Amino acid sequence: MLKLSKSEAENAFAKLAEDYIVIAPKTETGRGRFSDTDVVRYDRVESLSEIVFAARTDFSAKSVLFPIRETMFDCVGADAEPAHIEIRPTIVFLRACDVNSLNVLDAVFLENGGYEDCHYKRRREKVSVFLLECAQSFPNCFCVSMGANKTDSYSVFVRKEEDAYAVKINDKGFEEYFSAGDDSQVEPHFVEDDPKPLNVPASIDASLFENSMWKEYSKRCTACGRCNTSCPTCTCFTVHDIGDKDDKEKSERRRIWSSCQTKNFGLLAGDHDFRVPKGDRMRYKVLHKVADFKRKFGFHMCVGCGRCEEVCPEYISMARCVEKINEIAITDREVL
């Protein structure tokens, strides 16, 4: 546990950047939603001063482990081999909710049905987590309610102070990079209360499937899929075979992010689509996040980061949707 001056911290970061790709929240100048506005997104950083410590990103860093487009196999005729992709050791700066989201990705890709996804696993083994703290909640966060506000699963914690950096090292493998600095008691701060505490129902009756609340979302949702792409725990993808323009015998099999909210996601052979109304898609997503996944793995899929509400063009709130479900569950119990 150390207190480093700015120069000592930058020197330590420079040594890390020689051995690792470093991904962290970074200000993208002029790339915001509106003209002449900035946005904070996850990107590669070359210096410690580039890292934004005090703002939440609209989109998560899950693409480090689960790329938007990823070549899985190189194919020649009927033969296929795993794609040869060099994966360098990577450091990702994450907040507690995003660290906990890795548990969801691990469950989906490494523990689901007794099989391991080799493409995910080889990236996961190369990633180390550096923790960013949240002394207080950001707007629309509800991580405390989802049990994702705290973590000890990180290699190094870094706090930016006025004229210094505080560092706590959990992984001794990183001690060599932080040889300077003064001994100091350093512990991360974690959010203790949500702006609006959320009650997640312990059980959900199947009668909720036909509740009229979902019709509201059919009217409001535009099926753009931004909630899925911003979410740190959504893992849906499609698989495409891409032919080589110059050699008809060669092709690539790629997986590409998909969204349960977009048109034709539920389309089956024979042109049967079992989730046409947008409210049905919303129902599927929400219940998977707060009920179905937990029944299988023992913890919620949603980590309460609030990003989906931030990026939704219709301002649809995941938290408010869960509140409605809880209100319906309470009413049903009272009727019984």
Image: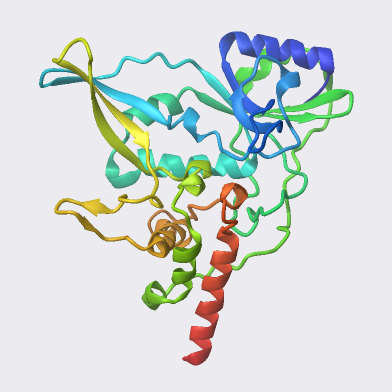
Taking the image as shown, residue 108 lies to the left or right of residue 241, namely: right
Residue that extends furthest to the left in the rendered view of this protein? 78
Q: Quadrant of residue 29?
A: top right
Taking the image as shown, residue 118 lies to the left or right of residue 20, namely: left
Q: Nearer the viewer, residue 222 or 234?
A: 222
Residue that extends furthest to the right in the rendered view of this protein? 163
**At x 48% / y 84%, what residue is drawn?**
332
Would residue 240 be seen by someone viewing this image from the given angle? yes
**At x 46% / y 60%, what residue is drawn?**
286
Residue that extends furthest to the front in the rendered view of this protein? 35
Residue 41 coordinates in the image, percent (x, y): 62, 31
**At x 73% / y 50%, what residue is drawn?**
137
Q: Nearer the viewer, residue 304 or 223?
A: 223
Image height of 156 relative to 323, above or below: above
Q: Nearer the viewer, residue 61 or 41?
A: 41
Would residue 131 be seen by someone viewing this image from the given angle? no
Q: Quadrant of residue 164?
A: top right
Residue that extends furthest to the bottom in the rendered view of this protein? 335
Q: Quadrant of residue 19?
A: top right
Residue 281 coordinates in the image, percent (x, y): 39, 59
**At x 41% / y 56%, what residue is drawn?**
293
Q: How many marks?
A: 0
Image height of 53 relative to 83, above or below: below
Image height of 299 relative to 327, above or below: above
Q: Quadrant of the N terminus?
A: top right
Q: Nearer the viewer, residue 286 or 144?
A: 286
**Looking at the image, what colour scheme do you see?**
rainbow
Residue 138 coordinates in the image, percent (x, y): 72, 48
Residue 172 coordinates in the image, percent (x, y): 63, 22
Taking the image as shown, residue 291 lies to the left or right of residue 132, namely: left
